[in-house]
Image: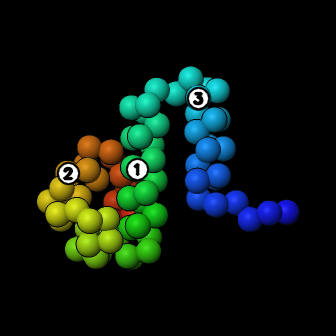
């Protein structure tokens, strides 16, 4: 079995989202939420490290966490 690139994997996921008629806004929100949650796990919830990894200002990250209703188990 061939190794799938990130692009290939994303195409598969996007096709599924389109099939389920998920709006672009909802798809982007879901992607951002998961991306931040996975970064939180990698950085052990350290928001300063998370912000650096994500290329965001710490305050912007805090606002995104609040807006996306990301669980406190992912960030301290």
Q: Could you tell me residue 49's position as x and y percent?
A: 28, 76
Circle 1 residues within 10 Å: few <14, some 14–19, many ≥20: some
Which label's residue is closer to the chain start, 2 or 3? Answer: 3
> 45 or 32, which lies in front?
32
Image height check: is 38 above or below 29?
A: below
> 3 or 45, which lies in front?
3
Residue at numbered disc 1: 33
* Marks 1/2: CA–CA distance: 12 Å
Residue at numbered disc 2: 63
Q: Are marks 1 and 2 in contact (CB under 8 Å)?
A: no
Which label's residue is closer to the chain start, 1 or 2? Answer: 1
Q: Callout 1: helix, strand or loop?
A: helix
Image height check: is 20 above or below 54?
A: above
> 32 or 55, which lies in front?
55
Q: Callout 2: helix, strand or loop?
A: helix
Q: Is residue 73 visible?
A: no
> 57 or 2, which lies in front?
2
Name the quadrant of the N terminus: bottom right
Task: Give me the residue at 38% from left, 76% from top.
Answer: 43
Task: Give me the residue at 52% from left, 27% from top.
Answer: 22
Q: Could you tell me residue 27's position as x and y percent?
A: 46, 37
Task: Give me the residue at 39% from left, 32% from top.
Answer: 25
* Marks 2/3: CA–CA distance: 28 Å
Q: For residue 59, which numbered disc appears in the image?
A: none
Name the quadrant of the C terminus: bottom left
Q: For residue 18, which numbered disc appears in the image?
A: 3
Q: Callout 3: helix, strand or loop?
A: helix
* Marks 3/1: CA–CA distance: 19 Å
Task: Give me the residue at 17% from left, 63% from top.
Answer: 57
Residue 5 placement: quadrant: bottom right
Q: Could you tell me residue 64's position as x and y percent?
A: 26, 50
Circle 2 residues within 10 Å: few <14, some 14–19, many ≥20: few
């Amino acid at each position: 079995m061939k190794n799938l690139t990130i692009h290939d994997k994303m195409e598969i996921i996007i096709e599924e989202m389109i099939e389920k008629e998920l709006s672009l806004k909802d798809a982007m929100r879901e992607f951002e939420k998961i991306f931040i949650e996975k970064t939180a796990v990698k950085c052990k919830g350290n928001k300063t490290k998370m912000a650096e990894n994500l290329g965001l200002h710490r305050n912007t990250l805090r606002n995104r966490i609040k807006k996306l209703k990301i669980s406190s188990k992912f960030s301290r």
